[in-house]
Image (tube, grey):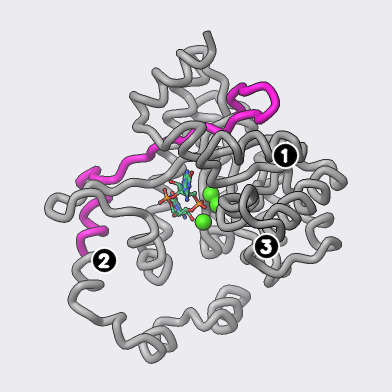
Amino acid sequence: SDVAMYLAKEGRTGVELYLADKDRNSPERLNLLGDLRRAIDRSELRLYYQPKLDLAVGEVRGVEALLRWRHPTRGMVGPDEFIPLAEQSYLMRQLTEYVIDAALEQAAHWWHTGVHEQISVNVSARDLLDSALPERLEAGLARYRLPPKAIQLEVTERILMTDQAYTADAVRALASLGVQLALDDFGTGYSSLVRLQRLPVSEVKIDASFVGRICESRDDERIVRSIVDLVRSLGLRSVAEGVESAEVAKRLAEMGCDLGQGWWLAEPMSAVDATEWLRKHRD
Ligand code: C2E
Ligand code: CA
Ligand code: CA
Ligand code: CA
């Protein structure tokens, strides 16, 4: 099947991973995976929300949902620690279902109380192989009486670029629903201009590793500038990730980068704090 072919190609079958990485069966990892399985049921997982702002006028243009895990003994565990682990197991599907349902519920809460902000949800490569994903989204949007633009999906450059065949169906189904896609972590993969043009994405997120040093490094400055120009020439929206200072925000605005996201603009916040932040920011 396509799935098996993809997994084999990516070296993602259980056996290959097992052999490739001996740490995979370390008690530490197995414990965390077991804990994660229970975390879903015990609602230890929460979405945090980080605003994206228009760099020219300072207005909010949506929020990104970022998963947080409040582990009973380890404290806060970041997604970089458990998403890669979940991605190699059957848990990822459950995790994404949780994230999508939670994001839709939050979107409904905001949308029906006058806060019309799009929520972006991160999805993994495997999620795009799940043919139930578009139907799930469609049903969720209908259940909460939400327009398709209430949700956006962020997919990494690598996923969309490496194998168009297996993503084509999922991407087409999502596009026909009217759900927008953002290309995440741009600059870290191997895109070609032609391919970027063919993908039905509306937004390109420039990876924080380039954005962070644009005021110190001429090379990084040139890279970000050329990505911003490229994105604009394709009629898409550019988003700079990792905006950590006023100087960087200013330089990005001068380049014509549309949106910014980062600690200096707004940190990821709990649903309660984000609601308050969004309300305040509107007045
Ligand atoms: P990402 O999609 O690239 O998300 C942006 C990351 O940058 C987030 O890390 C965010 O907290 C962090 N960040 C925000 N502002 C700044 C800043 O000014 N400087 C820097 N250096 N970083 C900043 P986080 O929340 O730890 O998430 C890490 C990664 O985990 C995400 O990277 C994403 O790939 C993945 N992830 C998070 N939530 C989910 C989820 O619900 N599903 C999936 N599949 N992946 C997720
Ligand atoms: Ca993202
Ligand atoms: Ca990113
Ligand atoms: Ca990243």
Comparing 185 with 147, the one in front is 185
Q: Name the residue under label 1.
A: 257
Whether residue 42 appears in magenta in the rendering, the answer is: yes
Question: Is disc 2 in contact with disc 3, using a CB cutoff of under 8 Å?
Answer: no
Comparing 211 with 22, the one in front is 211
Q: Please provide percent x and percent y for residue 191.
A: 74, 65
Residue 272 lies in what quarter of the image? top left
Q: Name the residue under label 2.
A: 33
Q: Disc 1 or 2, which lies upstream in sequence?
A: 2
Q: Distance between the residues labelled 1 and 2?
A: 39 Å
Whether residue 144 is situated above or below residue 280 in the rendered picture = below
Q: Residue furthest left?
A: 73
Instruction: Decide if residue 4 is on the left or right side of residue 276.
Output: right
Q: Mark 3 points at which residue?
A: 160
- Ligand 2 contact, mark 3 (Cβ < 8 Å): no
Q: Is mark 3 on a helix, strand or loop?
A: helix
- Mark 2 residue crowding within 10 angstroms, few (<14) / some (14–19) / many (20+): some
In the image, the segment drawn in magenta is 34-61
